[in-house]
Amino acid sequence: MSESWIVGINPVEGALSNDASRVREVLVENGQRNARVQELAARAKALNIPVHHRPREQLDRVSGEARHQGVVARYEAPPMGTENDIPELLEAAGSNALVLVLDGVTDPHNLGACLRSAAAAGVTAVIVPKDRAVGLTPVVRRASAGGADRVPLIAATNLARALRTLKDAGVWITGLAGDTDTSVYTIDMRGPVALVLGSEGEGMRRLTRETCDFVAQIPMPGVMESLNVSVATGIVLFEAVRQRSEKR
């Protein structure tokens, strides 16, 4: 386990609501009058979590690039999951398994936004490479608006092997790419499925793409050639949600 700082109102609220036992202390900016910050401080005290009022400069130091909004929490983060955790997660989800795979997303704002969409869509797990990708930084947690605490995050040492584990468990895998004529709206996303999106610049790596059962694109009638990875993630996840909500 390692300690990190959770930064901002929504991330701190998410930690207190979903994993309060790992919150070690809450720092509130001196003179902070925001009602939500005051409510978080009161909730932390009720949970016997120490609350300290500190100068803004101290919150700035621990927050790095993330905007703290007057509140941060020191958090004892559990280790990210591994490939070994995938079978158990899939078994618990059964035919409703919906997995998001992000092949090399390096921008923390993008990963945070993807985690936020994943949590909203009820995703079973998010799988990322252990290397060549951003980890759970304070910026990621801030951008996820609490999503980082609501969806299991798996750091795969070998992403292709993790994908084969999904396939062996009966999960159908669809990768997103722009150089195909197949529309994502023609793919059946009911049942256990995984959706794979590549990095911001290069897309899916070759081995990742070759492991997919299908490769599809999001049709774009406009003049842009591609979408931001977090936007594309939201579109395909909620297409899956739409399909699953319809009667067969």
Image (spheres, rainbow, N blue to C red):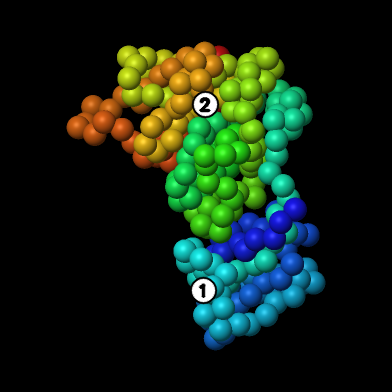
Q: Which residue occupies 68% across, 44% down?
A: 80
Instruction: Check disc 2 and give the amino acid type.
Output: Leu
Instruction: Check disc 1 and give the amino acid type.
Output: Asp
Tell me residue 82's x, y (percent). 70, 35
Q: Are marks 2 and 1 in contact (CB under 8 Å)?
A: no
Residue linked to disc 2: 195
Tell me residue 144's x, y (percent). 53, 51
Q: In this picture, is 94 found above or below 134?
A: above
Q: Which residue occupies 47% across, 64% down?
A: 65
Q: In this picture, is 174 found above or below 232?
A: above
In the structure shown, which secondary structural element does the residue marked by tag 2 occupy?
A: strand
In the structure shown, which secondary structural element does the residue marked by tag 1 occupy?
A: helix
Classify residue 192 by image quadrant.
Answer: top right
Say left or right for 137 vs 182.
right
Q: Residues within 10 Å of mark 2 (few under 14, many from 20)?
A: many
In terms of depth relative to the viewer, which is nearer, 123 or 85? 85
Q: Which residue occupies 68% across, 14% down?
A: 168
In terms of depth relative to the viewer, which is nearer, 109 or 207? 207
Q: Nearer the viewer, mark 2 or mark 1?
A: 1
Q: Residues within 10 Å of mark 1 (few under 14, many from 20)?
A: some
Q: Which residue occupies 63% across, 18% down?
A: 164
Tell me residue 126's x, y (percent). 59, 36
Say left or right for 235 vs 15.
left
Residue linked to disc 1: 60
